């Protein structure tokens, strides 16, 4: 099977004639754009605009499929069901797994395979019959993700993180022109008023970085926290005033932020 199996992912299936409108009113991106061969990345927020979950939305033309973090699947099923009310929508686990490919790995010719909507360099994702996972392959995917600066659910604090702090605006995870959705007001206000005080940024250390959760400091003051780490590279949630500062320290390791080319540091876009 081509591609790398992602064992930390699960797939939910949404059926019924109201599935698109139902989900569109709840998430940060335009669900109608999901189509065979084209996926959409979106965030699911609290009414206060704080992160609950994120997922990739696939469509085979008859159902929607949510490629989500395995630890969020049960919560998503429960919360989505609560919002269903009179909508004709079914929500259930799908017996599918997730694979990803990059760096020239050929994308499967299948309606449930699509380019990763965040960045061209991210490669592609596909929903496939439940595969067996290889942990060393997953480590390679994590290194690839971190090198590109792509956030994962583990990098976000549930009910605390704003979508823009996790770079959803720069990675095609937010539509600022679609209709209303839960948490839209806070997301839009943060964007248009340039209120963002911190962001998740790629960082590079002079040696291997310490683990997830290690405080990042400058001149003895906490200015952020490490999130995902792979060798000398990682992601860190950093306060705005130190995005270009050097040196930063994490448990004695010197590091610096490496803002990616896709991120507009002069917000809003």
Image (cartoon, rainbow, N blue to C red):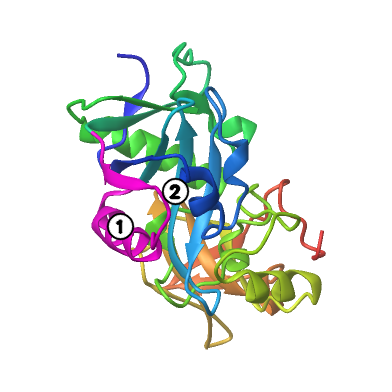
Relative vertical location of residue 254 with respect to residue 89 in this rendering, above or below: below
Vertical arrangement, residue 173 with respect to residue 96, above or below: below
Q: Is residue 251 left or right of residue 259?
A: left
Is residue 169 found left or right of 192 in the rendered image? left
Whether residue 226 is visible, yes or no, is yes
Q: Does residue 68 sit above or below 47 in this rendering?
A: above
Instruction: Measure how far apart labels 2 and 1 are at the Cα level.
Output: 10 Å
x then y, percent, for residue 229: 40, 55
Instruction: List the single residue furthest toward the bottom.
Output: 221
Q: Start and end of the magenta stretch? A: 69-94
**Residues under numbered marks 2 and 1 in contact, where contact means CB atoms less than 8 Å apart:** yes
Which residue is pictured at 73% across the width and 58% down the height?
A: 176
SS assignment at label 1: helix
Specify whether residue 86 is painted magenta: yes
Residue 16 is a magenta residue: no
Residue picked out by circle 2:
55
Look at mark 1 in the image and give the residue it sits on: 72
Q: Secondary structure under badge 2? A: strand
Q: Would residue 208 be seen by someone viewing this image from the given angle?
A: no
| Foreground residue among 62 and 166 | 62
């Amino acid at each position: 099977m081509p591609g790398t199996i992602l064992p930390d992912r699960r797939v939910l299936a949404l059926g019924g004639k109201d599935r698109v409108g139902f989900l569109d009113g709840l998430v940060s991106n335009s669900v109608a754009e999901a189509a065979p061969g084209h996926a959409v990345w979106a965030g699911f927020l609290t009414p206060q605009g704080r992160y609950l979950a994120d997922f990739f939305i696939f469509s085979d033309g008859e159902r929607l499929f949510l490629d989500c973090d395995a630890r969020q699947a049960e919560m998503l099923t429960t919360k989505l069901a609560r919002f269903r009310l009179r909508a004709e929508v079914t929500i259930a686990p799908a017996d599918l797994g997730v694979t990803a490919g990059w760096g020239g790995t050929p994308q499967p010719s299948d309606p449930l395979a699509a380019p990763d909507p965040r960045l061209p360099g991210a490669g592609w994702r596909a929903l496939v019959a439940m595969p067996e996972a290889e942990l060393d392959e997953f480590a390679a995917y994590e290194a690839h993700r971190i090198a590109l600066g792509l956030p994962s659910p583990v990098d976000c604090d549930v009910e605390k993180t704003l979508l823009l702090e996790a770079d959803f605006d720069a990675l095609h995870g937010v539509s600022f022109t679609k209709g209303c959705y839960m948490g839209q007001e806070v997301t839009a206000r943060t964007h248009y008023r340039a209120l963002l005080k911190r962001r998740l940024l790629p960082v590079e250390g002079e040696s291997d970085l310490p683990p997830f959760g290690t405080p990042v400091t400058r001149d003895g003051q906490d200015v952020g926290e490490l999130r995902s780490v792979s060798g000398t590279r990682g992601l860190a949630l950093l306060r705005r005033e130190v995005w270009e500062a050097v040196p930063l320290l994490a448990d004695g390791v010197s590091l610096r932020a490496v803002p990616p080319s896709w991120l507009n540091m002069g917000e809003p876009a």
